[in-house]
Image: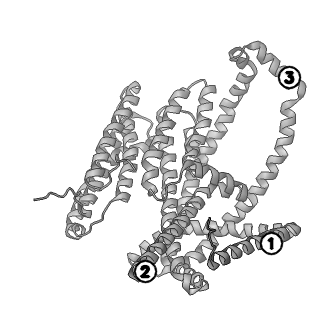
Amino acid sequence: MKKRQISDESLNRIIKYLAIVILGFGIILLAIQFSDFWNWILRAIKSVIIPISLAYFSALIIFPLIKYLEKKGVGPRGFSLGLVFVLTVGLIFAAFYFLTPLIVNEIKNFFIDDYPVIVDYINNDLRNEFLFGADLYDKIIAYVNETNLIADTVDSFVPKLITSLTNMLLPLLTAFALLPILLIFYLNDYEVIAERMRSIIPSKHEKNVAELSSRLNQTVGAYLRGQLILMVVLGSVATIAYKLIGLKYYFFFGFLVGVTNIIPYFGMLIAAVPPIVYTFIATSGPGPLLVLLVNVAMQFIEGNIFQPLIMSHQLSLHPIVIIISILFFGSLFGAIGVIFASPIAASIKVIYRFFTDLKKEKLKNSTTEATSS
Amino acid sequence: MIKINRPRIYSKYEINSIVFYWTMLLLMPIVLVFTYVFDTFTNNSDVRVYLLILVGVTVLITIIGTIFLLIKRDKLKRMVKATYVQEFYYLVIISIFGILGLVVLYKYLGGRPEYIASILVLSLLLFAYVLLNLGRKYFNLNYGRKK
C-alpha cells in the first residue's frame, strides 16, 4: 500500500501549531508560579473593564440619539450631548422620585400588615394544613429545634452574605459613580476615540476591524435599546395587570418584573415567583392561578412578540446560551456580569458570525481566482 | 402576462397615517391606564368629566395631526422603506397598553368585574388579528411565517 506523503507546507504548519501549544503551556506553567502577581494584575484589569464596558454599553444606547439630534441640526456636539445627558439624568431622577416612595411604602405596608400574619400562619395554621399530616410537622419542628438548624444556618449564611454583598456593591458603586464622567468624555470624542483605536490596528486588518466594530455597534446597540424598552414596557404592563386583578403591592411586583427582565427569557420566570408565593399566603386578593396566568401571558408576549421584534433572527440567542453566559460572566464579574451576560453573549455571536462570513468570502475569492487562472 | 406575487411596499405617508390614527384611537385608554395605576380619581363624577376632556383633547390632536400629515404628504410619499419593523414595534407596544386601558375604561364606566377577564381575552384576540394583518399587508412583516 502506498503511504500518503505529508507536504512541506502541512509539516511546517503542524510544527508551528505544536510550538504555539508548547509555548502556551510554558506560559501557563510560568503564570501558575506567580499566581499572586497575576491575581493582582487581573483584579486591576477587572476594575478597569467593568466601568469601561458599562460606559461602552451605555454609549451604544445614547449615541444614536445624539446622532439623530445632530442630523436634525442640533449642534455642536457639546450642546446635543448636554441636551441628551440632561434628558437622561432627568428621566432617571423623575423615575426614582416618583416610584421610590410608592415601592418603599408598599414594602413598609408589607412588614406592618402581612408579615405578622405570615409568621402567625407558619407558627399556628400551617400545622393543621400541612400536606403530610400534623404528626410529621411536629417531628420536623422538633428536629429543627433539637439540631438548632435555623440558627446555625443563619449564623453561617449572614456573614457570607454580607461579605459577598460588600464585594459586589463596591465595584458596582464605583462603576456607577464613574459612569457619567466616562460617558461624557466618551460620547464627546466618540469618533476621535474610534479613529485612534483604528490607528493602532495594522493597516492590513484595518478594513476588517472597522467592519466588525460597525456590526458590533449596530447589532448590540439595537439589542440593548430594545431590551431597555422591553424592561420599561413589561414592568408597566405587569404593574397595570397586577392592579387590575387586585393584587396587593402591585408596584413592587411590577417593578420586579421590569428589573429582572434584564435577563432575557428567565427574568420573567424569576419575577413570577414572589407574587405567586405571596398569593398562596395572603388571605385576600387574587388566587395563585390568576397570577400565574397573568405571568404566563406576559411571558408569551415577551417571548413570541417582543423578543423576535427587538432582536433580528441573527442576534436571537438560544436560552441555553443565555444560561451558560449568565453562569460564566456572573462568576467572573458578579452582579454586573449577570446583567451584561446577554449583550456580551450577543457580541460574541456577532464576532463569530463575522469570522465565518470572512472565511466564506475568502473561500469564494480563492475559488474564483482558481477558476479564472 | 406573468403575474409576479410581490408584496406592495407602502410609503412613509401610509405607515405614518396608520400609526398616527391607531395612536389616536388608543390615546384615551392609554392615558386612562396610567391614571388608574396612580389612583388619580377617587369618585365617579371626576372620571366622567375627565373622560369628556380626554375625548376633546384626542379630537384636537387628531385634527392637528391630520393637517400636519397633509402638509408633509408629498415629502412622506417619496420616503420608502423595505420593512417597517420599528413602527410595527411601536404599534404593538401601544396596543398592549390600549387593551389594558380598554379594561380600565370598562371598569371606570361601571362594568361588572366578573367580565373583565373575558373582555381582556376577546380584545387581545381582536387586536392580535388586526395587528397581524396590518403587519403583513402594510408593514411587510409576515409574522405568522415559520422561520
At label 3, the amino acid type is Tyr
For the question of whether residue A86 can be seen, the reply is no
Q: Which label belongs to residue A143?
A: 3
Of callouts 3 and 2, which one flags the residue occurring earlier in the amino acid sequence?
A: 3
- Quarter of the figure with the C terminus of chain A: bottom left
Chain that bears disc 1: A
* Residue beneath the point at 59% across and 51% down: A322
The residue that mark 1 highlights is: A27
Foreground disc of the pair 1, 3: 1
Horizontal relation, residue B27 to residue A54: left or right: left
Amino acid identity at mark 2: Glu
Coordinates of residue A278 in the picture (x, y in percent): 62, 31
Q: Position of residue A198 (x, y in %)?
A: 57, 82
Which sits earlier in the primary sequence, circle 2 or circle 1? 1
The reply, left or right, for residue B76 in relation to residue A91 is left
In the foreground, B18 or A124? B18
Q: Residue furthest left?
A: B1
Badge 1 amino acid: Ile
Q: Nearer the viewer, mark 2 or mark 1?
A: 2
Could you give the CA–CA distance between mark 3 and mark 2, rounded to whole angstroms?
79 Å
Chain for numbered disc 2: A
Q: Earlier in the sequence, mark 1 or mark 3?
A: 1
The answer to whether residue B75 is seen in the rendering is yes
Image side of residue A214 versus residue A101, left or right: left
